[in-house]
Structure formats: C-alpha cells, structure tokens
Image: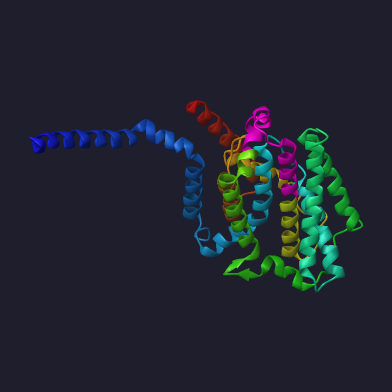
C-alpha cells in the first residue's frame, strides 16, 4: 500500500519539478535575466565584436594593457561609488589626481631615494582634499556639487602653483618602479586595483559600515532615526574618495615619470560613467562595487577596441555618451519592472 502510494507522489513531485524548471526557462524569465545582467551581455558582445574585427584584441598582452589602463581609473571609480551611494557626487577627483601627482613629483625630486615618501605625500594630499570636501558637505551642508566643484578649481590651480605653472620633469628613473614593477606577474597598479575591488566589495557587503552607507543614500531620515551618524558617514566617503584619488595620482605620475599639472583632467567624468553604467543610482542607495568594476572594464575595453580599430576620438566620445544614456535607460526600465 505504501509502495503504491509513493509512486504517484514521486510522479507528482517530478512533475512539479519539471514545471518549475520549465517556468524558469520560459521566455519572460530569460528576458528578465537579460535585463538584469544587461551590462554583462553588452560586455560579452563588445569583446566578441572586437575579437572578430582584430586579431590583436584577443591577445593576453592586450588584456594586460586594458588592465593597466583601468587601474588608476578603478581607484577613483571606487571612491566615486561610495560618494554616489550616499546620494552625492565628487567632481574634484581629477584635479586631486593632478595635485597629488605634482606633490609626489616634488617630493621624489628632493628625496630620490625615498619612493615610499612620495606615495605617502600623494595619499596625504588626496586625503586632505577629500576631508575638506567631506567637512563642507557634512558639517557646513554645502551641496556636494558645489563643494566638489570648488575643490576641482582650487586643486587644479594648486597643481600649477606647485610646479610654478610648468610640468615637473627630470625625475629619477626609480620613480617609474611604482607603476611599472611587477609582483606575482602583475604590475603594481593592477594588483592594487584587484585588492581594492575585493576589499571594498567585502566591506560594503559584510560590514556595518557598508550598511550605513547604503542607509544614508537610501533614506537619510530613517537612517538618522536608526542611530546612523550621517555626518560621519558623509565625511568618510569623501575623505576615502580623495585618498584613492591621491593614490591614483602618484601611480599615473610614476607611469610617465613626470608631474604634469593637467594630469587627470576629465577623469572624474569617466569615473562617474563607470559607476552609472555599473547600475548605481545617482539618487543614492543603490549600486555595488562589482557593478562599478564591470562598468569600468566595459569603458576601458571599449576605448581599447576603438583605438585598435583606429576610430577617431570624437566618435569614441559619441559612442561612450550613447552607452551611458542607454545604461541609465535600461536601469530605470528594469527598476520599474521590479516594482
């Protein structure tokens, strides 16, 4: 009796499982997955297209070139992610890169044997600039756009002041070791990028600090009622953004072994683009480190492929602009479908 009853039960259970699998593989489910992972699909299509058009694109050397180009942008994009998650924006990171690069160049020229000091000075300058942004936004209640726009202009001017209006050249060859030496087969900037992405992703996903950042961006009133120190969170994200920009500045200066006062000009726009393409909301409270990393790699892969195909720079700007708008449109549409 029990055996006879168990057979229909197994049949029913198997039928339900088959229906569940069929439901998962249905058209609406597949369409929903494609929308949710639209940037991954776009990334794969871009790689496939450029690999088809050029043999050079699909090589290991070219992959390393993309990674090296992405590394300095990754640091400022990570900092920008934290800021945007709180509902703010940091327009000053490009100028902070220039100021940090010039400061590190001056330091290493005066102390050629102390490369570590040049790195520390660049990071300190970036941290100081970011802390000023954080103070203005969190304590003085200056809108982030205005506060960081002011820092953009100030830091850019100070970069020229440091070099007396000219680039700082004649730096020791050892300065290039910061960006060009390898550890475990990877150039130092690439290794820093990987460690930064992994560490920050872990912090945002697994720690109370990450939860507080999301809370401040999602609903600051509710976060304050819950006991979140909003001013501390806001101060910290801008300070971290400046610190990462400072580190990016010294790596970029090391790559070219000089201190150009216009280094980093416009980089803030690419950083914001990477965050937005990665699915973050400019209103705050939504986004991820992994999304930013994907957005950054997509932009750098696109830049690299278009350069290999010798596409004019002005068309590259058009294509990137269309991609940004499309990414935001898909994200908004996807969000409405989930509601």
Q: Is residue 22 visible?
A: yes
* Coloration mode: rainbow
Nearest to the observer: residue 198 or residue 169: 198
The stretch drawn in magenta includes residue 93: no
The image quadrant that residue 261 belongs to is bottom right
Q: Is residue 282 visible?
A: no
Nearest to the observer: residue 328 or residue 338: 338
Instruction: Give above or below for 198 relative to 170.
Output: above
Q: Residue at x 78, y 51 (%)?
A: 127
The stretch drawn in magenta includes residue 236: yes
Q: Main secondary structure of the magenta part?
A: helix
x and y percentages locating residue 267 in the rendered image: 72, 48
x and y percentages locating residue 337 in the rendered image: 48, 27
x and y percentages locating residue 283 in the rendered image: 65, 31
Number of marks in picture: 0
Q: Residue at x 84, y 48 (%)?
A: 155
Range drawn in magenta: 214-242
Q: Residue at x 75, y 47 (%)?
A: 239
Is 295 on the left-hand or right-hand side of 176? left
Q: Quadrant of the N terminus?
A: top left
């Amino acid at each position: 009796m029990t055996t006879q009853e168990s057979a229909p039960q197994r049949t029913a259970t198997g039928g339900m499982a088959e229906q569940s699998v069929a439901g998962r593989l249905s058209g609406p489910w597949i369409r929903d997955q494609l929308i949710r992972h639209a940037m991954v699909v776009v990334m794969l299509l871009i790689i496939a297209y450029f690999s088809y058009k050029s043999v050079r694109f699909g090589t290991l050397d070219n992959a390393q070139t993309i990674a090296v180009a992405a590394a300095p942008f990754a640091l400022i994009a990570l900092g920008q992610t934290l800021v945007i998650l709180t509902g703010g924006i940091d327009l000053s990171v490009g100028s902070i890169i220039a100021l940090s690069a010039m400061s590190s160049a001056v330091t290493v020229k005066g102390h050629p044997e102390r490369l570590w000091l040049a790195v520390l000075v660049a990071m300190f300058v970036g941290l100081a600039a970011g802390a000023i942004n954080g103070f203005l936004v969190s304590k003085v209640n200056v809108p982030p756009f205005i506060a960081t726009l002011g820092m953009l202009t100030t830091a850019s001017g100070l970069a020229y002041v440091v070099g007396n209006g000219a680039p700082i050249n004649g730096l020791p060859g050892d300065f290039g070791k910061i960006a060009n030496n390898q550890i475990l087969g990877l150039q130092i900037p690439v290794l820093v990028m990987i460690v930064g992405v992994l560490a920050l992703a872990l912090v945002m996903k697994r720690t109370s600090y990450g939860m507080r950042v999301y809370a401040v961006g999602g609903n600051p009133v509710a976060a304050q009622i819950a006991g979140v120190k909003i001013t501390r969170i806001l101060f910290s994200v801008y300070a971290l953004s400046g610190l990462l920009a400072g580190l990016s500045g010294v790596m970029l200066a090391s790559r070219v072994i000089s201190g150009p006062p216009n280094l980093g000009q416009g980089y803030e726009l690419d950083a914001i683009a990477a965050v937005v393409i990665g699915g973050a909301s400019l209103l705050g409270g939504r986004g991820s480190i992994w999304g930013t990393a994907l957005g950054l790699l997509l932009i750098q892969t696109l830049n690299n492929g278009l350069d290999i195909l010798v596409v004019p720079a002005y068309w590259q700007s058009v294509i990137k602009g269309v991609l940004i708008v499309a990414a935001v449109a898909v994200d908004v549409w996807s969000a409405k479908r989930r509601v």
